[in-house]
């Protein structure tokens, strides 16, 4: 957990591209504070409020760095880039590795769990779901760890996200789904689950890697931290983890060329900024980077909504579903343009 790179498709889309022109910070030395420790020098002058705040934050970081570190999930960190590239997932940070429930299970469940670590993951998951039809608890006990759709192997992760549906895991009429720091609820309709609240209200539930799901009461304390929500608030482009404790994370966040030692407060899956040790002369540069990130995020969210709408509508590009005796290639372009101009689907 010494290094954590947050990368996503949106990050790629947001990167400036201008032929062979150099990127804004390419070749520019990064600004990095190599330590968090006692201040050097014996300047007796009273520090400015900004400098006093920075020193206070460093002192608080030193306290947190002495606290016990959580175990984390090293196998996820080792495969993070592959997992996020191969599957639909939230870029969460695990404070502890999800495990199977400790209660005794039948031999068939034990066999399923062993099979998931061997052989062909896609075929194994398919077999478990097929043999557990009408027995959702069996599938749930075999596939979920602490309620998480969790995998450390990229092939198994792909199989879980591609094949597992919530109605195959739960016989309940109502379930909750925790994705990042957000908890949504869903109800069964015609055998499938549909969201009944939140931004996805009315849509059919599809599970992503590292989602957590359960029936009945609200979810217990999570094992993960939501880093996407934190990035949307602070607009950093990279994170390096120093130490994770029960209620804090000491990390360096990069804004352009500037690495800022930061102390993050955690509450459940929610992560917020407690303080940052930033030299006063670097504040304007970081504020400008954050402001640009906020503008970029608003623009990309608009594009993202349009992309998701196209996926939901399963739009063909230019080939009609049916042709009767003559070619209709090209006709969809004019129909698409007309719908767009009249603000229709």
Image: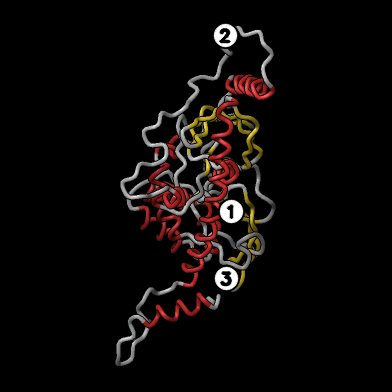
The residue carrying mark 2 is 41
Where on the picture, by quarter, is residue 243?
top right
The residue carrying mark 3 is 191
Between marks 2 and 1, how big is the CA–CA gap? 53 Å
Q: Do the residues labelled 2 and 1 touch (CB within 8 Å)?
A: no
Task: Look at the image and tell me whether residue 104 can be seen.
Answer: no
Residue at image location 63% in from the left, 35% down from the top: 273
Total marks shown come to 3
Front: mark 2 or 1: 2
As displayed, is residue 242 above or below residue 7? above
Q: Position of residue 137 (x, y in %)?
A: 55, 57
Q: Position of residue 160 (x, y in %)?
A: 44, 55
Q: Is mark 1 on a helix, strand or loop?
A: strand
Q: Position of residue 222 (x, y in %)?
A: 61, 42
Task: Tell which circle, 2 or 3, labels the residue nearer the N-terminal end.
Answer: 2
151 and 284: which one is in front?
284
Between marks 2 and 3, how big is the CA–CA gap? 69 Å
- Mark 1 neighbour density, 10 Å: few (under 14) some (14–19) many (20 or more): many
- Mark 2 neighbour density, 10 Å: few (under 14) some (14–19) many (20 or more): few
Q: What element carries label 2?
A: loop
The residue carrying mark 1 is 213
- Mark 3 neighbour density, 10 Å: few (under 14) some (14–19) many (20 or more): few
As displayed, is residue 267 above or below residue 338? above
């Amino acid at each position: 957990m010494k290094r954590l790179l947050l990368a996503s498709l949106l990050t790629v889309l947001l990167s400036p591209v201008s032929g062979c022109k150099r990127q804004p910070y390419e070749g520019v030395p990064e600004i990095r504070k190599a330590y968090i420790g006692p201040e050097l020098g014996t300047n007796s002058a009273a520090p400015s409020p900004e400098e006093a705040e920075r020193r206070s934050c460093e002192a608080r970081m030193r306290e947190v760095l002495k606290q016990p570190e959580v175990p984390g999930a090293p196998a996820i960190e080792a495969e993070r880039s592959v997992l996020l590239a191969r599957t639909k997932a939230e870029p969460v940070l695990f404070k502890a590795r999800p495990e199977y429930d400790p209660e005794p299970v039948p031999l068939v469940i034990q066999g399923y769990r062993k099979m998931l670590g061997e052989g062909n993951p896609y075929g194994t998951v398919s077999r478990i779901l097929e043999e557990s039809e009408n027995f959702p608890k069996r599938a749930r006990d075999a596939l979920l760890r602490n309620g998480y759709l969790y995998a450390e192997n990229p092939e198994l992760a792909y199989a879980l996200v591609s094949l597992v549906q919530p109605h195959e895991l739960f016989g309940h009429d109502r379930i909750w789904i925790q994705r990042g720091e957000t908890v949504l609820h869903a109800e069964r309709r015609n055998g499938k689950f549909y969201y009944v609240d939140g931004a996805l209200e009315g849509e059919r539930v599809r599970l992503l890697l590292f989602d957590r799901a359960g029936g009945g009461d609200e979810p217990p304390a999570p094992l993960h931290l939501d880093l996407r929500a934190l990035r949307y608030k602070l607009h950093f482009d990279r994170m390096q983890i120093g130490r994770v404790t029960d209620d804090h994370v000491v990390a360096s966040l990069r804004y352009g060329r500037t690495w800022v030692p930061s102390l993050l407060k955690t509450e459940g899956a929610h992560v917020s900024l407690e303080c940052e040790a930033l030299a006063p002369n670097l504040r304007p540069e970081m504020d400008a980077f954050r402001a640009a990130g906020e503008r970029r995020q608003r623009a990309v969210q608009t594009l993202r909504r349009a992309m998701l709408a196209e996926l939901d509508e399963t739009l063909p590009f230019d080939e009609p579903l049916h042709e009767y005796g003559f070619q209709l290639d090209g006709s969809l372009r004019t129909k698409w343009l007309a719908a767009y101009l009249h603000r229709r689907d």
